[in-house]
Amino acid sequence: MSQVGKEKRSHDLLAGQVGESRNQVHCYTRLASLISPILEMVDEKEIAFTIALELSYLRANEQERLYETMKSEECTPSLSQAIRLKKMSQENKLDTDRVLAILSEQKPNQKEKMVIQKERINPYFPSGYTDKQKEEVIVKLLKRWSSNRRF
């Protein structure tokens, strides 16, 4: 039996055991090809699953370049950018300059973001609070603060 046949059979068996589709099991196992820092970004919901799936096809050294660029530019790729990164990788054309060029593009739905390091604000919230709950509290406090100020 070929390696592809074994993988398909393994995915079928695992899918039956965990109650997922074979395709979903394949997607989850693809994520194991991600380097740890990018996988952590997926776990933290900083990168969407579908985007991560495309990035999993990049070679490890390309993922390292991508990760460094994401950190230095404080951004993550959109799905269309991830697809182009994958295509360039498959064509052996993906280098640091191309990663930067793709990630530097203005995304149509891109909004400006302000980033606050979690370690700066976590001490002020109960341990069970999600990032969304923290954001809601901060915005509520800012509204209250703003209404009490005279400009």
Image: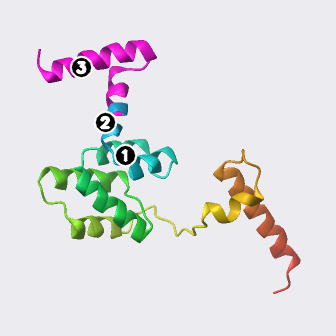
**Identity of the amino acid at label 1?**
Ala
Label 2 crowding class (10 Å Cα cut-off): few <14, some 14-19, many 20+? some
User: Who is closer to the viewer here, 71 or 101?
Assistant: 71
Question: Disc 3 to disc 1, how far (Cα)?
Answer: 21 Å
Q: Quadrant of residue 2?
A: top left
Number of numbered discs present? 3
Q: Circle 1 — which element?
A: helix
| Residue identifier under label 1 | 52
| Residue identifier under label 3 | 8
Label 1 crowding class (10 Å Cα cut-off): few <14, some 14-19, many 20+? many
Q: Are marks 3 and 1 in contact (CB under 8 Å)?
A: no
Residue 34 image offset from top left, x and y in percent: 33, 45
Which badge, 3 or 2, comes first in the chain's sequence? 3
Which badge, 3 or 1, comes first in the chain's sequence? 3
| First to last magenta residue range | 1-27
Residue 88 image offset from top left, x and y in percent: 17, 56
Which badge, 2 or 1, comes first in the chain's sequence? 2
| Residue identifier under label 2 | 30
